[in-house]
């Protein structure tokens, strides 16, 4: 969108606002120009539009939505949920499968699945949302840092941060699901058993 000519940027925003409002009756030129400015503004910046509509600059995307509307498709985890290791655990909005596999196992991970050293992870694992004061040592880093700082640098959209599932051992965050595992629990050449966790979104009932 940033690479389009200005005239096309304005056209895209007019179409987006027409879709949001149902018409362009309340949309003025100043609103279109404000969106163009927001497009090149800082990540996380938000502007208010007429009739309770807002626009947010999230890293990699622009979001136009009604005030108070959740723009993240993942549910907020308001409690902590113990994982069954091995087995299947049902969470609000998620099915989590845990498998224990031998050292020769290999399967490519994606944003919804990850592999860990079972001995380092243990079996006393929970899934929860973020909490004040959370720290995380991401893969490849030799020290922990504030989870909030990691999420900003990893381009986790602000509206998503309370909904990102965190897999935790009793002492640390082992996986920021969808983004990164913890460095201490990674699979190495000395790993004897692999714990593989896979999240699957539950189908929305129609």
Image (cartoon, rainbow, N blue to C red):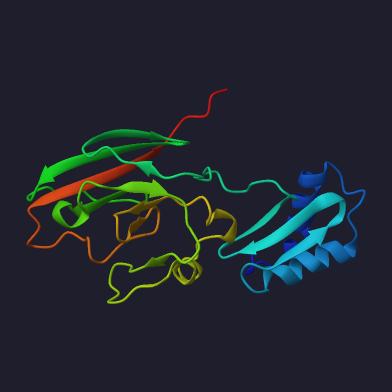
Q: Residue at x 47, y 65 (%)?
A: 151
Tell me the quadrant of the picture where the N terminus can be found: bottom right
Left or right of 111, for residue 102: left
For the image, the number of numbered tags is 0
Left or right of 154, for residue 43: right
Residue 106's spot in the image, x, y percent? 15, 49
Placement of 78 over or under 95, stated as above or below: below
Q: Going by the picture, which residue comes out furthest to the front? A: 170
Q: Quadrant of residue 160?
A: bottom right
Q: Residue at x 17, y 59 (%)?
A: 187
Placement of 135 over or under 87, stated as above or below: below
Residue 37's spot in the image, x, y percent? 75, 72
Left or right of 31, for residue 132: left
Q: Residue at x 7, y 62 (%)?
A: 190
Instruction: Please name whichever residue, 15 or 114, is drawn nearer the observer in this view of the structure.
Output: 114
Instruction: Please name whichever residue, 136 or 180, is drawn nearer the observer in this view of the structure.
Output: 136
Residue 19's spot in the image, x, y percent? 77, 44
């Amino acid at each position: 969108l940033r690479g389009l000519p200005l005239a096309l940027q304005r056209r895209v925003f007019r179409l987006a606002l027409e879709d949001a409002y149902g018409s362009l009756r309340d949309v003025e030129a100043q609103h279109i120009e404000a969106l163009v400015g927001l497009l090149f503004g800082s990540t996380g910046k938000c502007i208010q539009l007429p009739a309770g509509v807002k626009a947010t600059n999230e890293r990699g995307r622009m979001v136009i939505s009604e005030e108070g509307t959740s723009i993240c498709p993942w549910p907020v985890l308001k409690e902590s949920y113990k994982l069954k290791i091995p087995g299947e655990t049902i969470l609000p909005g998620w099915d989590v499968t845990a498998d224990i596999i031998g050292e020769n196992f290999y399967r490519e991970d994606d944003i919804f699945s990850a592999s860990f050293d079972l001995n380092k992870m243990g079996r006393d694992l929970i899934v929860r949302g973020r909490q004040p004061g959370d720290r995380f040592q991401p893969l490849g880093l030799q020290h922990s840092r504030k989870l909030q700082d990691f999420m900003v640098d990893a381009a986790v959209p602000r509206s998503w941060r309370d909904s990102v599932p965190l897999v935790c051992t009793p002492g640390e965050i082992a996986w920021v699901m969808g983004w990164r595992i913890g460095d201490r629990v990674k699979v190495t050449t000395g790993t004897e058993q692999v714990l593989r966790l896979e999240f699957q979104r539950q189908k929305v009932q129609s």
